[in-house]
């Protein structure tokens, strides 16, 4: 199955749908450019019986058991090397404003960490 993960939202949503093959899926997981306007479900049919989902972390970690299981999975993948985490830059906690400006200015390409000395 062809899947697109869209964390941008408003400015990339329509283009993302156009890129999907029939029966493809779009996972809308963010809205950094703004929320997507209301969608007519018929557009999914016309573009090839597409699937659209808007998952929210809280629905997948509703109980303490789910949270621990999912965190265990992710941290296990990091530990065994099957998931690599790209750290763009570390900022001292006292320089949090610079980290925020870098994020807002879209100057980052990985995780931004605030660290204490």
Image: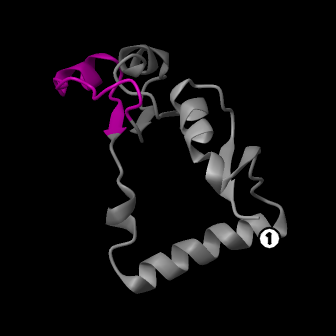
Q: Position of residue 57 (x, y in %)?
A: 40, 59
Q: Residue at x 40, y 84 (%)?
A: 64
- Residue 22 lies left or right of residue 1; in this view the side is left
Q: Which type of secondary structure does the marked residue at label 1 adopt?
A: helix
Whether 17 is among the magenta residues is: no
Determine whether 64 is above or below 33 in the image. Answer: below
* Up/down of 42 relative to 7, above or below: above
The scheme the figure's colours follow is one colour
| Type of secondary structure dominating the magenta stretch | loop
Task: Answer left or right for 89 relative to 5.
Answer: right
- Does the magenta portion include 42? yes
State which quarter of the image contains the N terminus.
Answer: top right
Q: Quadrant of the C terminus?
A: bottom right
Along the line of sight, which residue is nearer the eye, 34 or 106? 106
Q: Residue at x 39, y 71 (%)?
A: 61
Count of picture labels: 1
- Residue 104 image point, x, y percent: 51, 29
What residue range appears in magenta? 31-52
Q: Residue 56 or 109: which is nearer the viewer?
A: 109
* Residue 71 x/y as whole percent: 57, 73
Give the quarter of the image for residue 15: top left
Q: Position of residue 116 (x, y in %)?
A: 70, 64
Dot 1 crowding, Cα within 10 Å, few <14, some 14–19, many 20+: few
Confirm whether residue 2 shows in the render. Answer: no
**Label 1: which residue?**
79
Residue 105 in view (yes/no): yes
Above or below — where is 49 with respect to 96? above
Q: Residue furthest right?
A: 81
Q: Residue at x 61, y 37 (%)?
A: 98
């Amino acid at each position: 199955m062809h899947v697109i993960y869209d964390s941008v939202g408003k400015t990339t949503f329509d283009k993302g749908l156009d890129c999907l093959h029939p029966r493809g899926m779009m996972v809308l997981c963010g809205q950094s450019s703004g929320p997507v306007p209301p969608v007519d479900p018929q557009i999914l049919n016309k573009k090839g019986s597409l699937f659209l989902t808007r998952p929210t972390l809280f629905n997948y970690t509703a109980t303490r058991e789910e949270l621990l299981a999912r965190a265990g999975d992710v941290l296990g993948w990091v530990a065994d090397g099957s998931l690599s985490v790209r750290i763009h830059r570390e900022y001292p906690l006292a320089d949090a404003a610079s980290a925020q400006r870098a994020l807002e200015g879209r100057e980052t390409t990985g995780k931004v960490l605030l660290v204490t000395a």
